[in-house]
Amino acid sequence: MKWLKRIFDFYLDASIHVAFAVYALVQISFQTLNIFSDQHLSFFVFFGSISCYNFIKYGVEAEKYILVANDYQKGIQFLSFIAAAIAIYHGSFLSFEVWIGIIGLVLLTGLYSLPVLPKSKNLRSLGGLKIFIVALVWAGTTVLLPILAAEEVLSWDVGLELTQRFILVFILLIPFEIRDLAYDSKELNTLPQYYGVTKTKIFGGFAILLLFFMTFLKDELSVEELILKGFLFLILGIVLFITKRKQSKYFASFWVEAIPIFWFALSIAIERLFITSLEVALSF
């Protein structure tokens, strides 16, 4: 069974799991906003997330990323290069407008991870900004890029979905921030460091309420979306409630990151249920 655990750990360490989460959020945007599903963008985001996340985790110092010490990291490095090549292939089919959005997000990611500021190593090292930058990049990637790919306008509903996605990622990052209390430098000034675990969870609870009730402000609101947001409201509330400083190894890295994947799977199930119910109704 050790080889199964090793494969599972590689799946997490090589950022495949988080890439599936990003991919799932892109698909949800296609469904929720009722826009054209661009599969080249979907695959670009999936494979690009693998290479990008692995570079942030392991390759901030380029020398260490090229001169890898062990076979395990070499495997992650090899996967990252293959994923980058596949992402570039799919990226070649994307429009100029989408690439403008991608470049903007890449620059923001670079400022987040690379030492480009004179008095700070990167934006990540600036107190309190870490969680907001990550949420902004995820929201832009999973909502703004699909809108640009579908050549849709930035309507009121799109703005609401973009804001909700930012809030969602912000909430999902809270368990990670609490988990990393023992490892993060005090200079980061993360929410749990500044406000404490209890107040951070209360703040996250208010964010969950805001995320759900913003749904009712949409001009076009379907029953399916309302049900999905309701399930998301419950899942996020439960996860935030059970989050502790001392977590199991896979609580945040697997279960929390799996929430967008479960959400997407649920959206497919509900969509098929509604289609089946409609077909049954029409048959009478």
Image (cartoon, rainbow, N blue to C red):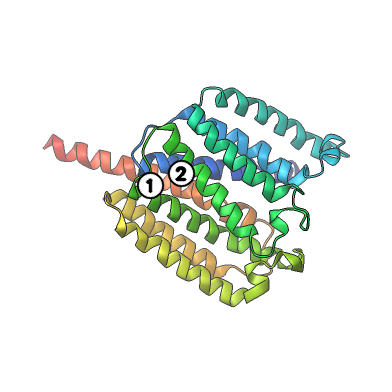
Q: Residue at x 71, y 48 (%)?
A: 113
Count of numbered circles on the image? 2
Which element type, helix, strand or loop, lies under badge 2? helix
Quarter residue 214 falls in: bottom left
Which element type, helix, strand or loop, lies under badge 1? helix
Residue nearest the observer in this picture, 72 or 172? 172
Circle 2 residue: 143
Q: Find out whether the residues at labels 1 and 2 contact each other: C-beta distance under 8 Å.
A: yes
Give the CA distance from mark 1 to mark 2. Answer: 8 Å
Quarter residue 6 falls in: top right
Question: Quarter of the image containing the N terminus?
Answer: top right
Residue nearest the observer in this picture, 104 or 90? 104
| Disc assigned to residue 168 | none
Q: Earlier in the sequence, mark 1 or mark 2?
A: 2
Amino acid type at circle 2 is: Val
Q: Is residue 196 visible?
A: no
Label 2: how many Cα within 10 Å (few below 14, some 14–19, many 20+)? many
Question: Quarter of the image containing the C terminus?
Answer: top left
Q: Is residue 111 visible?
A: yes
Image spot of residue 16 (x, y percent) = 63, 40
Circle 1 residue: 158
Image spot of residue 183 (x, y percent) = 76, 64
Image spot of residue 114 (x, y percent) = 74, 47
